[in-house]
Image (spheres, rainbow, N blue to C red):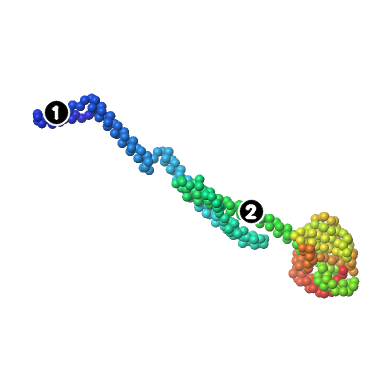
Amino acid sequence: MFKTKYYYDSKTLSYRKIKVSKRVQLRNILAFLSVSAFFGIVVLLILLQSPILNTPTELSQSREISNYKFQLDLMNKKLDQLNIVLSEIEQRDNNIYRVLFETDPIPSEVRKAGFGGVNRYENLEGFENSKLIIETTKKIEILTKQIVIQSKSLDEIERLASEKEKLLAAIPSIQPIKRSDLTRMASGYGYRTDPFNKTRKMHFGMDFTAPKGTPIYAASDGKIIRADSRSTGYGKHIRIDHGFGYVTLYAHLNDYNVRRGQTVKKGDVIGYVGSTGRSQAPHLHYEVWKDKKRVNPINFYLGNLTPEEFDDLLRLANEENQSLD
């Protein structure tokens, strides 16, 4: 209901009622409603663009974005912890494992190499939290690359460990005749008097005297590459290829216990002491070859001798006497 309005009539010195037509009243009402609607829409638009008023959808999205940001911050902390753990593994890899297996460490520039070239994160730019997202993505990619490099390094370490184990098994490490079966160590490696022509010449092995038929043992794991008497002076003899350049030779045998191509283990009986070939008495002539060169067998007996027994054997081997072959 509109209030009744009056005006003062100076002629009659009294108030008179203002009469408004229905048309004017309708026009005024429409004008008021139009202005109110206009200002209402303007105010609503302003409120919608301000953080004061949010729709339920916007409130939900805001909570999700805050949660994502929290999760990204948490992920970054975990990535930093993983980087510390990986760094410790890398240090052990370089300073322990690779030193132990005598191989070069992986350079830091290879482990820490980044990603050059074009902008890899262009599609992540232009958002409210782009910096955080890009940094997190970059950390994940670098960590992934470092893990791949470390994984390959550990594969190599595993291979080196396996090779090292094979190498240790390949190195001749025991005396080919048991000490209890040994009559004496007749001659060592070095210049000795030849028993046939009495001249001084290089003796490239060690002679162990023992009764005929005494068992002879493989000095280490390997494969029989010869078991015959077709080599001048050696008579019946056996050669074992142990791998990694190591070959052992057992000469003047009475009989074989293996055949060519057979695989043997350290300590297997491969033959028996005899006096075949260029020999003066039953004994074993034993040689060690490394990379096709004969070396002193005295360095390969610690596997079955006590320090005292080795010292005694070393003393006898260094005596320059007459060899038996």
Residue identifier under label 1:
16
Name the residue furthest front: 118
The C terminus is located in which quarter? bottom right
22 sits to left or right of 261: left
Residue identifier under label 2:
152
In the rendered structure, are the residues bearing label 2 and label 1 in contact, judged by CB atoms less than 8 Å apart? no
232 sits to left or right of 116: right
In the image, is residue 148 above or below residue 6? below
Tell me the SS state at disc 1: strand
Q: Position of residue 16 (x, y in %)?
A: 14, 28
Name the kind of residue labelled 1 in the image: Arg
Pick the residue in front: 76 or 269.
Answer: 76
Residue at image x 58%, y 52%?
145
The local crowd at label 2, few if under 14, some if 14 to 19, many if 20 or more residues have their Cα within 10 Å, is few
Residue at image x 75%, y 62%?
171
Name the kind of residue labelled 2 in the image: Lys
Tell me the SS state at disc 2: helix
User: Which is closer to the viewer, label 2 or label 1?
Assistant: 1
Instruction: Tell me the quarter of the picture where residue 165 sits.
Output: bottom right
Label 2, label 1: how many angstroms apart (C-alpha)? 105 Å
Pick the residue in front: 55 or 301.
Answer: 55
Pick the residue in front: 69 or 107.
Answer: 107
Residue at image x 18%, y 30%?
5
Residue at image x 63%, y 60%?
105
Q: Position of residue 303 (x, y in %)?
A: 75, 64
